[in-house]
Image (cartoon, rainbow, N blue to C red):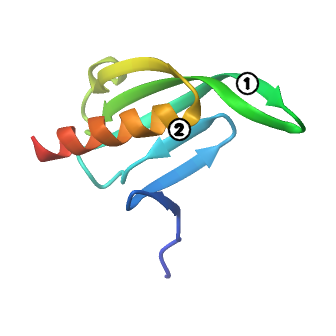
């Protein structure tokens, strides 16, 4: 069976389902979940305004509460992605 190709950002998978995005590989120890909390319209385009970021441990034996390592809320998807990249790189190196 062929592996499914995902979009990437800075070399890591980026998957979107509705207003939720996952950044990183589920095979790694950590992954980032981003939830779009609000949107605004610029011209004809709807863009993310507030984005919640969560660094999660992918260990399935942990309770959902213990999987959450770090969280924050940022204005704009690009700012959220930059923070997510820093958090994920630091977590994967430790």
Image coordinates of residue 40 in percent, x first then y, are 77, 24
Q: Residue at x 39, y 57 (%)?
A: 10
Could you say which is closer to the camera, residue 11 or residue 24? 11
Q: Residue at x 25, y 39 (%)?
A: 59
Residue at the spot of label 2: 78
Q: Is residue 60 visible?
A: no
Q: Residue at x 29, y 39 (%)?
A: 86
Q: Is residue 29 visible?
A: yes
- Residue count near mark 2 (Cα–Cα under 10 Å), binned few <14, some 14–19, many ≥20: few
Inter-mark Cα distance, 1 to 2: 13 Å
Please identify the residue farthest to the bottom as the structure is shown: 1
Q: Say above or below: 49 vs 29.
A: above
Callout in the foreground (1, 2): 2
Could you say which is closer to the camera, residue 85 or residue 62? 85
Dot 2: what SS?
helix
Residue at the spot of label 1: 39
Residue 52 got which mark? none
């Amino acid at each position: 069976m062929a592996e499914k190709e995902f979009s990437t950002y800075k070399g890591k998978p980026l998957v979107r389902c509705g207003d939720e995005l996952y950044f990183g590989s589920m095979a790694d120890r950590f992954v980032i979940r981003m939830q779009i909390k609000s949107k605004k319209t610029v011209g004809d385009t709807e863009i993310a305004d507030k984005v919640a970021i969560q660094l999660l441990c992918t260990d399935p034996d942990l309770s959902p509460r213990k999987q959450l390592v770090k969280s924050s809320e940022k204005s704009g998807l690009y700012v959220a992605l930059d923070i997510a990249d820093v958090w994920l790189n630091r977590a994967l190196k430790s």
